[in-house]
Image (cartoon, helix red, strand yellow):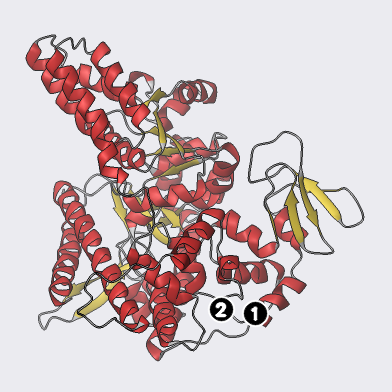
Amino acid sequence: MPDNLSQTVKQQADIVRVIGEYVKLRKSGAQNYTGLCPFHKEKTGSFSVNALHGYFYCFGCHEKGDVFTFLMKMENVSFPEAVRMAAAKCGIALPKREFNSPEEAREAGQRRQLIDIHEAATQYFEAGLKSAEAARAREYLTGRGVSAETIAKFRIGYAPDDFNHMREQLARHFNDEVLRASGLFSAREQADGSQGQLYARFRKRITFPIANEQGKTIAFTGRALDAEDEKGRPIAKYLNSPETALYTKGQILFNLDKAKAEIRKLGFALLVEGQMDCISVYMAGIHNVVATSGTAFTEAQVRLLSRFTPQKQVILNFDPDNAGQNAAEKACALLVEEGFEVRIVLLDDGLDPDRFLRERGLEAYTAAVRAAHRYMDYLIDRARQEFPARTADAKVKAMNFLLPHIRRMPNRIQRDEFAADAAQKLNIDSAILRQELKQAAAQRVESIRQHTHDPASETERILLRALVLPEDDPARTLAAEELSHHPEWYDGLPSAAILEALSNALAPENPLDAAPDQESRVLLARALEFVEEPTDVSTPPQSPAEQVENALHTLRFRHLEHRQREVRTLIAEAERRNDHEMLARLTAEKMQIDRTLRQL
C-alpha cells in the first residue's frame, strides 16, 4: 500500500471515533481522552488517546501507537487491512485497487459479489420469517424461548418451501456464475455432464446466518421443521452451506464477530458445540461464547482462538452424550497442544446449555461455568468411568487412555502434576505403571526441545531476508507476490505475522518497524543477523531468487501435506455422518492434492 495513501488516511481518520468503538472514552483535557485499556485488565483507566496528534498510550502496560497500530492489535489484521478499516470507519474514499492479473481481478470481484449475495439472501430469509407460511417456524422459535430481540440480533430467518422463488429474486441482481458459486442453490447433473437448472438448497427450514469475523454473512445453517418429507423419507435436521470461496467450515467459529470484544475483555472464550446453544448463552448475557459450525474442532479454529485470547484460556461446554464427550476430548487435545489452559463444564442431568438455561436459569448456568473442571481432572474422571473396575487390567486400560493426553501437554510441570494425580486417583501402586506415567511426562520435552532454540526455520529466514531487499529486487518481488496471494502457505508459522506485514506493504527504512509485535521483531532480527553456511561447498551457491523459489516450494509442499492430513480426517467424519455430498467434495479435493504433491 503506497505510503502517501496511508498518511492521507491517518491525517483524515478520527482516532477518537475509531477507538471509541472499542473503548468507552471520556474527555480529560482539550485534546485528550481516557478509558480502560483494552490490552490489559485494569480497574482505573490508564489508557489515553490524543486527538490532535493521533496517537494512544497506556500508562499501565505501555502499549502505544496510531490508529493503524490500534486496529492491527484489536482486529489482528495486517497494516494494509488496518488502513482500509480505518478508511471505512471514517468514510474516507480509497482509490480503486489495482490487480496483478485479470484472473486476480475476477476472483476479487466474485468474492465481493458472494458477500453481496449472502447479504441479499439474509434479507430474503428475514422477510420469509414474517410471512404467513412461516407460522410454524415462529411457533418453534417461541417454544425454544427465542425472543424477537434474539431473532433480530442473529438475523434468524426462514427459507420457504419453494424451489424457484429465491433464485428468481436473486437472479435480478446476480449472474448465473455467482448464483452457482454461492452455495445457496443446488443443481442436478444432466446426462451430458452439465449442470441443470438451479433450485434453492434451503427449503422449509429456519435459517441461521454464519458470519465471518467482520460480521458479514458467508454461509447458512438451516434447521428442518419436519422429520420426514411427504414420501416418508427422513430429513436431515440440520443442513449447512457447502464450502465456497468464502466459507470453510473448519476455519470459522460461529458468533466470533459478536464475541471477540468480550473474549479480549474477559481473557477467555466459552466454546459450545451448537449454534442454538451459542445463541441461548449469548442472549442470556454471556457474550464471550463461540461455537463450532457443523464440523469437528480443527487446528485452524485453535489458531483463530489464539488471536483473540492472548491469555490462552478456554472453557468447553459440549453436549454430555458420548459424541459430545468425544468431541470435547479431541478439541481439548488440540487446545492443550497449543498451550491453552482448558476447563470443562459438566451440566447436571445431561442437559445441553440451551435447555439448561431454559430450565435452570442464568444463575445456575453461571455457577456451573465457574465450577468448570480442570482438563486433567476431567480426563481422570473419564478414565475412572470408562474403566471402573479396580483390577490390574482396568488400571492398565485407564493408564493407556491417559498416556496420549499427558504427552500432548507442552508444559513439563503440568505433565508431572497430571501423572502424579492420575496415579493417586486411579490407585496405581505398581512401580511399572508409575514409571510409564513418569516417562510420558518426560517424553514431550525431547519432542519440543529442538524447536526452542530458534522458532523460525531456515525456509522462513530466507523469505524474511528477501522481503527486506529493495523493491525492484527479483527475490523480493517473487517472495512478496507469492506470499501475498497465498497466506495459507505460512499460516500458523512462528513468522506468520511478520511475513504478512512485509509481503503486503512497502518495506520501511528500518525493517524492524514493520513488525507488528515484539516477538516478530526479535524473530526478524535473528533472521537478518543469522545466515546458514552452505553444507556442500562443491555446489555453486544459489542466487537469492533461487533460494526464495525453493523456500516457496517448501512452504507450498508443507501446506499441501498438512491439508492432505486434514482432508483425510474430514473424510472419515463425513463417512461417519453419511454426508455423501461432503464426502464427494473432499474425495475430489484429496485426489487433486495427491496429484499436485506428486508433481511438486
Residues tagged 1 and 2 counted as in contact (Cβ below 8 A):
yes
Question: Which residue is located at x 45 percent, y 23 percent?
Answer: 359
102 w.r.t. 585: above or below = below
Residue 479 is situated, as x and y percent measured from the top left of the image, at 40, 78
513 w.r.t. 549: above or below = above
265 w.r.t. 575: above or below = above
User: Secondary structure under badge 2?
Assistant: loop
Going by the image, does 440 lie left or right of 274? left
| Residue linked to disc 1 | 3
Going by the image, does 537 lie left or right of 240? left
Residue 174 visible within the image: no
Question: Which residue is located at x 19 percent, y 79 percent?
Answer: 538
User: Which callout, 1 or 2, points at the residue further toward the start of the chain?
Assistant: 1
Residue 18 is situated, as x and y percent measured from the top left of the image, at 71, 60
Calculate the distance from the C-alpha at mark 1 to the C-alpha at mark 2: 8 Å
Residue 513 visible within the image: yes
197 w.r.t. 46: above or below = below
Question: Which residue is located at x 34 percent, y 65 percent?
Answer: 458
Q: In which quarter of the image is residue 159?
A: bottom left
Q: Residue furthest front?
A: 537
Rate crowding at label 2 as few (under 14), some (14 to 19) or many (20 or more) other CA atoms within 10 Å. Answer: some
Say the numbered circle drawn on residue 506: 2
Residue 6 is situated, as x and y percent measured from the top left of the image, at 66, 76
Q: Quadrant of residue 509?
A: bottom right
Q: Which amino acid does label 2 sit on?
A: Leu
Q: Quadrant of the N terminus?
A: bottom right
Q: What residue type is labelled 1?
A: Asp
Rate crowding at label 1 as few (under 14), some (14 to 19) or many (20 or more) other CA atoms within 10 Å. Answer: few
Going by the image, does 488 lie left or right of 583? right
Residue 549 is situated, as x and y percent measured from the top left of the image, at 31, 79
Q: Quadrant of the C terminus?
A: bottom left
Going by the image, does 103 lie left or right of 592? right
